[in-house]
Each structure stands twice: as structure tokens, then as C-alpha cells.
Amino acid sequence: MKKIGPKGLKWLKIIHLLLVVMFFGGILSSTALNLQIDLQNYNESYLAYKGLILISDHVVRYGAIGTLLVGFVYGFFTNWGFFKHRWVGVKFVLYLVQTIIGIFVVDKLMVANMRMLETQGALALSDPGFLQNHEIRQVFVWFQVAVTIFIIIISVWKPWKMKKA
């Protein structure tokens, strides 16, 4: 396969950084919004969950998909590969785990709570399932924040020596 040249690599890095900022910014915004929800106030909770879904659907998701696609471009069309350097492999695996958790835990719980708010109204706020979903979602969002910070640290420090062929 033809490899991307130096100029292309610079553009790829710019795109990668913008998408990561979009992804991480969405996660941080979601975290801040989730922490400020007054679960005693239906209207505020409903609007906050609407906001969480908008952030997830239009910021986090596009940043996540874009970052994943750029990762594939790096893996297939540059000399970085996927596992040539351990730190790149660790980043790639952590990002996949993080994305799977985002889709199958964070988003699933958020959508379930939104459905409860729409069907049960204010009664949803006292539903143990709603409250449990809210708390579990927040824990996993904090996990995503921690993993993203760890990935950023790995990207800067590039630990672990290159694998021997």
C-alpha cells in the first residue's frame, strides 16, 4: 500500500487533533452537564437529558467515528502501523474499549433515562432504575475521561520501546 508523505502526515495529525478535541470536549461537556442536573426538578432534568443526547449524537459521536477512521488511516497508510510501537497499540486498544463502553453503556443508559422521562414524566425522577442508570452512566463517563487523559499522556510521552521484529 502507498504510504502518506510528510505533508499528508501533517494534515492527518491536524485532523486527528481536531477530532480528539471534539470527542473529549463532548465527553467533558456531558460530564459537567450531568453533574449539574437537579434530579428533583423534572423540567431541568428533561432539558439536561435532551442536551446530553444532542452532545452525544452531534459532538461525541462524530469525534469518535472520525478519530477511529483517522486511526485506521494511520495504521494502514503510514509507517506507524497499529502495533509496530507498543504505545500506539495500547492507544488503539484503549480507544476501542472506550468507544464500545460509550456506545453500549453510556449511550444506552442515557437513552433509557430519556425514554423514562418522556413516558413517566416527573415520576421517572423517583424511579430506582432511572437513578441507578444516571449514577452508572456518570461513573462510566468519568472512566472515559480518565482513559482519554491516559491516551493523551501516552501520545506525548510515547513510552515502551519499539517491539523487536
Image (spheres, helix red, strand yellow):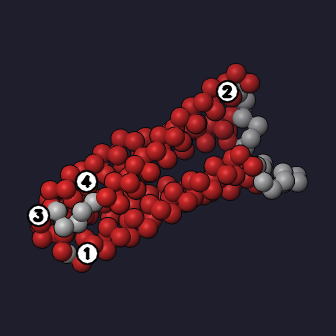
Cα gap from disc 1 to disc 3, whole angstroms: 14 Å
The amino acid sitting under disc 2 is: Lys
Query: Going from the N terminus, do you reach mark 1 or mark 2 first?
Result: 2
Instruction: Tell me whether the residue at label 1 lies in contact with that at label 2, contact meaning CB atoms closer than 8 angstroms.
Output: no
Measured from the top left, where is residue 80 in percent x and y?
A: 74, 41
Query: Going from the N terminus, do you reach mark 3 or mark 4 first?
Result: 4
Nearer to the camera, 85 or 151: 151
Lateral position of residue 86 relative to residue 18, left or right: right
Cα gap from disc 1 to disc 2, whole angstroms: 47 Å
Query: Looking at the figure, which quarter contains the N terminus?
Result: top right
Query: Going from the N terminus, do you reach mark 2 or mark 4 first?
Result: 2
Q: Secondary structure at mark 1?
A: helix
Instruction: Tell me whether the residue at label 4 lies in contact with that at label 1, contact meaning CB atoms closer than 8 angstroms.
Output: no
Between marks 3 and 4 in the image, the one whose residue lies nearer the viewer: 4
The amino acid sitting under disc 3 is: Gly
| Vertical comparison of 94 with 69: above or below | below
Nearer to the camera, 110 or 77: 110
Q: Is residue 150 visible?
A: yes
Q: Secondary structure at mark 3?
A: helix
Determine the residue positioned at 66% across, 38% down. 74
Q: Which residue is mark 2?
A: 10
Q: Which residue is mark 1?
A: 129
Cα gap from disc 2 to disc 3, whole angstroms: 50 Å
Q: Which residue is mark 3?
A: 121
Badge 3 crowding class, 10 Å Cα cut-off, few under 14, some 14 to 19, many 20 or more, is: some
